[in-house]
Image (cartoon, grey):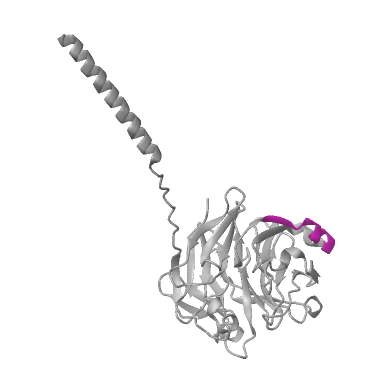
Amino acid sequence: MRRIFVIIITIVLAISCKNKAVKTEQEVKKKPVVEKKATIPVVETVFSSQDIRPCNIAMDTQKNVYVSINPLTPSNTKVFKLNIDGANTGEPYPNDDLVTGKESQIKAIIGIKVDSKGNLWMLDIGSKQFLVWNTKNNVLEKTLKIPADVTIETSFLQDFEIDEKHNRVIIADMTQGDLKSAPLPAFIVINIETGEAKRMAQGHQSMLPEIEDGFALNPIAIDPSYNYIYFGALNGRTIYRVPTQSFESDAQLRQTIEKFGEKSFSDGIAVDANENVYVTNIEKNEIGIFNKENGFKTLAKLPENQSWPDGLHVANDGYLYGTVDQLNRTAALNNGKDESTGPYLVVRTKLSK
């Protein structure tokens, strides 16, 4: 009798444990799975100033940093060399005669680059020429005129790239220089040695804004091997690219422009050796990145209350450097009211691997 009782108790306990296990399993299934959102890092600030308002940025192999000052923002000096080692100071570069005051040689500038020889290229949109300064020998290396026949009345020569493989500079002419006219964008291509210039692919669909009354061709970049030019409209969500060798003729250029990826509305882009395209996301005040594997996503965000990430530079120290200048808060882009408040920044974030 006792044995039968033990057997019954054992069976009851077994059934009870089984039912509890089933219930527990069902509860686990019913419990919602909470996915952890990845934390978006904030860019690191390496320069901050109430007075110097960096627009585009260039850096040489010695990590000297040069910035232009957008003509839409008030400044007596058009180009600065910055101290980014904590002092938050800058000095007119290369000298006052070239960049400071109403009588300076450079009148208005946005585009600025350093070539592999250490020459600082400054695109003066006021006098329609390049001034090339040898940063090693501290002398003016050359000037390169932009012929009048390759510009139009509303030309806005806001940025450029140096194609050292083919010995030419490629300018993104956004047009809309009055900030309101209809876009008629084009590439302006100049042979560095001869000065011969061409206006190319004018009005191509890839250069036009994707919204009504938007701004056209603006961000432009070249890969480190000088094989492709990457570009798009400021108010566009598409990254295009074209082989640098295609700039031999207008027909070849138009035929070889291809869609590469997606982006946000952006004022600047940069490309690394792994075909990562970095994008200044002016809609969300972030730095974005596009590659074929992961599509377009956020890489880092700006500090709180900052806006308009502008120029970008892929450096050889493993970082992407950029400027933050609140351009959207200037009177010209804010219904005549200037609501910008410093500080204005140079920031950096680690390059994607």
46 or 60: nearer the eye?
A: 46
Does the magenta-highlighted stretch encompass residue 62? Answer: no
> Hey, which residue is sitting farthest bottom in the picture?
103
Q: Quadrant of residue 310?
A: bottom right
321 or 186: nearer the eye?
A: 186
Q: Position of residue 101 (x, y in %)?
A: 58, 89
Q: Look at the image and tell me in which quarter the N terminus lies.
A: top left
Residue plotted at (74% across, 80% down): 154
Check the image and report above or below for 127 versus 38. below
Residue 315 visible within the image: no
Residue plotted at (43% across, 75% down): 88
Q: Position of residue 186 (x, y in %)?
A: 75, 70
Residue 313 visible within the image: yes
Q: Position of residue 352 (x, y in %)?
A: 52, 53
Left or right placement of residue 191 versus residue 300 in this view: right
112 or 214: nearer the eye?
A: 214
Q: Position of residue 60 (x, y in %)?
A: 56, 66
Residue plotted at (70% across, 56% down): 259
> Hey, which residue is sitting farthest front in the picture?
1
Residue plotted at (57% across, 49% down): 294
Left or right placement of residue 196 versus residue 295 in this view: right
How many numbered dots are placed on residues in this image? 0
Left or right placement of residue 156 versus residue 306 in this view: right
Check the image and report above or below for 36 versus 85. above
332 or 187: nearer the eye?
A: 332
Q: Quadrant of residue 254?
A: bottom right
Q: Which residues are magenta?
A: 249-260
Check the image and report above or below for 19 versus 238. above
